[in-house]
Image: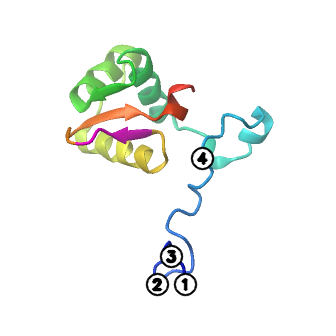
């Protein structure tokens, strides 16, 4: 058995997240791929990180930037942190090593 699968599941842990950068695909094909679609908050986060902060910001800057750019009020800091974590798992952002609460756009997301 491959080391990418655990003993309790026959599926690889990264199933559905192995598509990589989709920017080379035609728009008609990207529309058919569910993972390629960003939800509203993800789009706002990507746009704010890219346009306001040059691709990198800490959590406080993001909270303020999301409000100023999109009038988005974060209900709970933890919900935003969870969203960023899911975006990290999806390959849109990455946390900056040795900098707690600092996120930067991955190269593929910066071009969106």
- Crowding at dot 4, Cα within 10 Å, few <14 / some 14-19 / many 20+, comes out as few
**Residue 74 location, quadrant:** top left
Asked if residue 96 lies in the magenta stretch, the reply is yes
Please say which color scheme the image uses: rainbow
Q: Is residue 24 left or right of residue 75?
A: right
Q: Disc 3, disc 1: CB below 8 Å?
A: yes
User: Label 1 to label 4, Cα distance in Å?
Assistant: 24 Å
Residue drawn at the location 54% of the way across and 78% of the way down: 2
- Residue situated in front as seen by the camera: 39 or 97: 97
The residue pinned by badge 2 equals 8
Where in the figure is residue 17, as x and y percent of width and height? 56, 55
Residue drawn at the location 36% of the way across and 47% of the way down: 85
Residue 20 circle label: 4
Earlier sequence position, callout 3 versus callout 4: 3
The residue pinned by badge 1 equals 1
Q: Nearer the viewer, mark 3 or mark 1?
A: 1
**Residue 56 location, quadrant:** top left
Question: Which secondary structure, mark 2?
Answer: loop
Q: Disc 1, disc 4: CB below 8 Å?
A: no
Q: Is residue 66 visible?
A: yes
The residue pinned by badge 3 equals 5
Q: Nearer the viewer, mark 2 or mark 3?
A: 3
* Magenta stretch in the rendered image: 93-97
Q: Quadrant of the N terminus?
A: bottom right
């Amino acid at each position: 058995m491959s080391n990418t699968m655990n003993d309790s599941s026959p599926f690889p842990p990264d199933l559905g997240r192995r598509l990589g950068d989709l920017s080379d695909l035609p728009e008609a094909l990207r529309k058919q791929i569910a993972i390629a679609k960003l939800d509203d908050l993800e789009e706002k986060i990507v746009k704010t990180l890219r346009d306001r902060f040059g691709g990198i910001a800490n959590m406080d800057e993001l909270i303020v930037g999301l409000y100023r750019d999109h009038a988005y009020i974060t209900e709970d800091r933890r919900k935003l942190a969870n969203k960023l974590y899911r975006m990290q798992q999806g390959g849109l952002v990455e946390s900056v090593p040795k900098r707690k609460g600092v996120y930067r756009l991955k190269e593929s997301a910066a071009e969106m």
